[in-house]
Image (cartoon, helix red, strand yellow):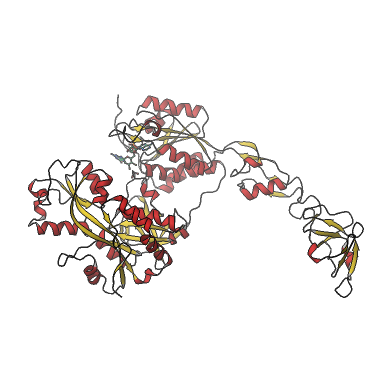
Amino acid sequence: METKRNVYLNMVGIQQAQDCLFEKFGHLETGVQTLDVVQAQNRVLAAPAVAVISSPNFHAAAMDGVAVDAESTFGANDEAPKSLTIGKTAFWVNTGQVLPDGTNAVIMIEHLNILDENTIGIEAPAFPWQYVRKMGEDIVATQLLFPRDHKINAYAMGALLSGGVFKVSVRKRPGVLIIPTGSELKRWQDVTPETMKPGDVVESNATVLTALCADHGADATVNPMLEDDLQTIQAAVSDGVDQGYDMVMILGGSSAGSKDYSKPVIENLGRIYVHGVTMMPGKPLMFGGIGDTPVFGIPGYPVSAIVAFEMFAGPLLLAMQHLPPLKQEVVAVSPVRKVASKLGREEFLRVKIGAVDGRLMSSQLPRGAGSITTLTEADGIIRIPQHVEGIEAGKKVQAHLLRPLDAIENTVVITGSHDNTLDLLSDQIRLEHPGMGISSSHVGSMGGLMTIKKRGCHMAGCHLLDPDDGTYNISYIKKYLPDVPVRLVNLVMRQQGLILPKGNPDKVKRLSDIAEKNVTFINRQPGSGTRILFDFSLKENGLSAADVSGYENEEYTHMSVAVAVLSGRAGAGLGIKAAALALKLDFLPVVTESYDLVIPEIYYHLPKVQALICTIQSAEFKQRVMALGGYGVEQTGEELFRSV
Ligand SMILES: Nc1nc2c(c(=O)[nH]1)N[C@H]1C(S)=C(S)[C@@H](COP(=O)(O)OP(=O)(O)OC[C@H]3O[C@@H](n4cnc5c(N)ncnc54)[C@H](O)[C@@H]3O)O[C@H]1N2
Ligand code: MOO
């Protein structure tokens, strides 16, 4: 029987929820175990580590040469050299060897005149203890090597072994039980792309959270996936608590759906402390306690699950082992465009960051919590406080970096129209110029030109048709970028046409058939070159927007237009042939157009931009483009126009 629908508890702020979590569970700490030092990387010392031997444990030669009593060398100079007798006043030593009794200095072999087998000459005195590593110079037995709570890194392992500490007492890694729930979930081992049915979802959160647990020093065990059933989930949670896991996480079922059981499970076995946090994503996060065990209800959407973990479960796992919080580099960035945000929720906005013109510029990625690529594509996260309604373009705000700054600085930022060859370019540039990368965001051709004007990108991908003379891009550059000297470099020629369902069921033969046969159309956003082309083509055919059903439905990329056709949401869309081919759809060519890069002169000579142009001009890139189908590379990499 299904339960009554859940009603959220009062939502609380992030800080309040964190305070509550630590008030209830902040006292928990994992037990102590003894480990060989060699096994103890990243562990936290539970007791101070004290050296039991000195290092070196004897006076050691620091150089290859002879060991001497320094006093016996005093007075030597180049006019009155001294000679020493091997075995009596001088003793051959190699670096690291014990200094023979009665000696206290080493003379380097380079400074010796070897007179015969038993005699050497020196032209300078040795100072006492020169080139000697004295006993205890590095570590003295009884010295404190590290206090408790020190995290053992690679260097520390070296110091411990050198100080004779071979075993250490460390905090145990917390054990976490992860219970994925949801009748729609499939194990990756059990599906293939062919066997996936609508409604099936590949389980991924357990893997992500297991890896995040490892990053936080914890060992996760993944319970077999459970159906949405109160009794089954409750039994698994109860068993986990009985088995002594330090933390239990129920994945999914945290919100208000009729099959969301995390809350009743925790309530039946213990107490809920928080359900609902004013953050986005991750809002329906909950946690409670069963006995002394913290139990989390982690929201099912992948990004929500990650945010919930990183804000709550992760910090608690670190604290249990006395590990310090993980630090992320924070930089000041300026959004290229105004960012809107909802009052009353702290938003974790995923952004791409580009180093353009000496500033770090951010452009926001889609906000969907179900979209893991909003995190994998992101260079950083801007946290927008709950009392802030949005961020003005150009205003400086803080972003937490997800990628090293130098990688961001080596990235060419391309904004504008979308084309599949940009993905290819992104891969090819890595091959030809390791360390370089491109980051492309899709705001349409006009959006690209406007971003150039605002100095928000290094180049813009454009395919803007001038209906008056059939040229591409040049008249728009003259009109919209009159004060910005730019170069126009061709990336590809490409076929644009109608993307149609496989087999062309509506028998569309020409563009006007869309209106005549009342085929539902999927459009592109205003300002995109494809939208301009479509409007132009309609006019050429004596048609208007009102004649096209679905004209108002918009997508942002060629691939999403193709997906709309594939899924049956639309019967036709205008887009590039490569997108139709990629999804095995039919394609009716309309025009061949020039897809070009508009590159401001001030960036053209940057090494990273030059690296990109070299890559575009390479034979391998052109071959890969041709293999996609629907493209021409006759002018690829050529400068078509310069407004200098
Ligand atoms: N009426 C309301 N509905 C929802 C609300 C709300 O306030 N009122 N909140 C939304 C928010 S915000 C979130 S976040 C989600 C959280 O949902 P649940 O925790 O209940 O998770 P599910 O419904 O089970 O799944 C959501 C989504 O994620 C997929 N999923 C779940 N587990 C996994 C997994 N282990 N690996 C991969 N993907 C997983 C699942 O298939 C669903 O697509 O609720 C909103 N609803
Ligand atoms: O928190 Mo839901 O957290 O917006 O996806």
Q: Is residue 378 visible?
A: yes
Image height of 484 relative to 218, above or below: below
Residue 336: percent from left, percent from top: 33, 62
**Left or right: 267, with 542 as reference point:** right
Q: How many marks?
A: 0
Residue 429: percent from left, percent from top: 41, 57
Q: Residue at x 34, y 29 (%)?
A: 228
Q: Residue at x 22, y 52 (%)?
A: 575
Residue 339: percent from left, percent from top: 31, 58
**Left or right: 142, with 212 as reference point:** right
Which image quadrant is residue 600 in? bottom left
Residue 299: percent from left, percent from top: 37, 39
Considering the image in quadrants, where does the C terminus appear? bottom left
Q: Is residue 381 visible?
A: no
Q: Quadrant of ligand 1?
A: top left
Which image quadrant is residue 298 in? top left
**Left or right: 581, with 345 as reference point:** left
**Nearest to the observer: residue 126 or residue 175:** 126
Image height of 29 relative to 530, above or below: above
Considering the image in quadrants, where does the N terminus appear? top left
